[in-house]
Amino acid sequence: MSKEWPLWEVFIRSKQGLSHKHVGSLRATDATMAVDNARDVYTRRSEGISIWVVESIHVFANDPTESDSLFEPADSKIYRHPTFYDVPDGISHM
Amino acid sequence: MNELFEYTIRMADDSLILGQRLAELCGHGPILEEDIALTNISLDLIGQATSLLNYAAEIEVGNRTADDLAFLRYGTEYKNLLLTEQPNNDFAHTMVRQFFFDSFRKPFYEKLQLSTDKTLAAIAEKSLKETKYHLKHSSEWVIRLGDGTEESRERMVVAVEALYKYTAELFFMDDVDQKLLEQGIAVDLNEIQKEWNRYVNEIFSEATLEIPENGWVQSGGRLGKHTEHLGYLLADMQYMQRAYPGMTW
């Protein structure tokens, strides 16, 4: 049996942010300890107001060898970007 | 004797000495996450000591600054609890020491917030937030290690046996306290003791640990009579100012 504690992924929501962002990972024996450790390791400089932790083994990722078929087809479809509109003068914050 | 100075110094030294003890673990924690947690707690305590020593220097109306009080007093002039100067030893000792202290500090600060001394009340209010987290942290570790593996439990039993004798002193009161109690400044530690006993029993029963029954207690820190460990700690802490007086960086 491995003596290493399970790995957890940490997500922090900042004061301004709407969504939790992945900030890194850490080790902890259980979810409660993971949140406490995340508080100590990742919010020391007032980075956040909310913490999520997910045990890393529950993250299912795409197969990197399939990158070609997954991501390249989108490269040639520039019409999916909303850049074909004329923005009238006087409209700010676009 | 200025009672308010003495009262403030006692409190400041508890934070300062325990903060220094925990700082020794910087880079030596059992795992990276806990290393940072212990250092955070150390910094919280040293921050509390800074506020309290600044206030003590103000009360004294002498030439000594907070830094002078922290770094240039002799061992017998430190008034911290003996508990706070006990060595880190293993992680069980470190956590049991922290748990006994936090279990005292939280209810103490809760009451000190209501002090008629506005500065102490303000420091208590600010420090309480930190202390609540310290107590949560140490309580969880006491439960986890006490009710953990055979080895962690064994080490916890040894640590409790070694440190419990210093807990009676948490509730030490003398003329300093009596005089300030009359003015509504000090906290009545008899009340804190009830809360401390209740909480420690609650966590210990969850941790399947027992409070030693032999009843032997050790005290003296509040009057400047320390265990042999304080001298070594001060030698470490004061070295720079003693070797290079007035140095800053």
Image (tube, rainbow, N blue to C red):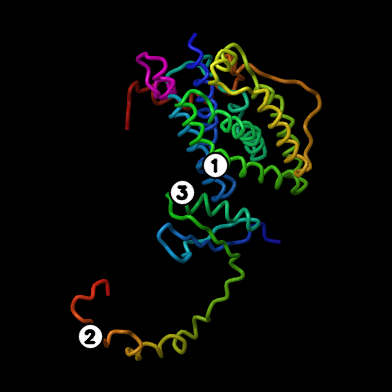
Q: Quadrant of residue B56?
A: top left
In the image, residue B17 sits, relative to residue B29, either above or below, namely above
Q: Which residue is drawn at 50% across and 20% down?
A: B9
Q: Mark 1 lies on which chain?
A: B
Disc 3 target residue: A44
Outermost residue, left direction? Answer: A89
Residue B12 in the image, given as x and y percentages of width and height: 50, 25
Disc 1 target residue: B38
How far apart marks 2 and 3 lie (CA) works out to 45 Å
Depth check: give the residue in front, B186 or B69.
Answer: B186
Residue A94 in the image, given as x and y percentages of width and height: 27, 75
Depth check: give the residue in front, B133 or B69.
Answer: B133
Q: Is the magenta stretch mostly helix, strand or loop?
A: helix
Question: Which range of residues does the magenta coloring cover?
Answer: B54-71
Q: Circle 2 sits in a helix, a strand or a loop, which is it?
A: loop
Q: Are dots 2 and 1 in contact, CB under 8 Å?
A: no
From the image, state whether disc 2 or disc 1 is nearer to you.
2
Depth check: give the residue in front, B50 or B197.
Answer: B197
Q: Which of marks 2 and 3 is nearer the N terminus?
A: 3
Q: Which chain carries label 2?
A: A
Outermost residue, right direction? Answer: B213
Q: Are dots 1 and 3 in contact, CB under 8 Å?
A: no
**Quarter of the image where the N terminus of chain A is located:** bottom right
From the image, state whether disc 1 or disc 3 is nearer to you.
3
Residue B7 in the image, given as x and y percentages of width and height: 52, 19
In the image, residue B179 sits, relative to residue A42, either above or below, namely above
Q: Residue B242 carries which label?
A: none
Q: What residue type is labelled 3?
A: Arg
Q: Which residue is drawn at 37% across and 21% down?
A: B65
In the image, residue B197 sits, relative to residue B59, either above or below, namely below
Disc 2 target residue: A86
Do the residues indicated by labels 1 and 3 lie within the same chain of the protein? no
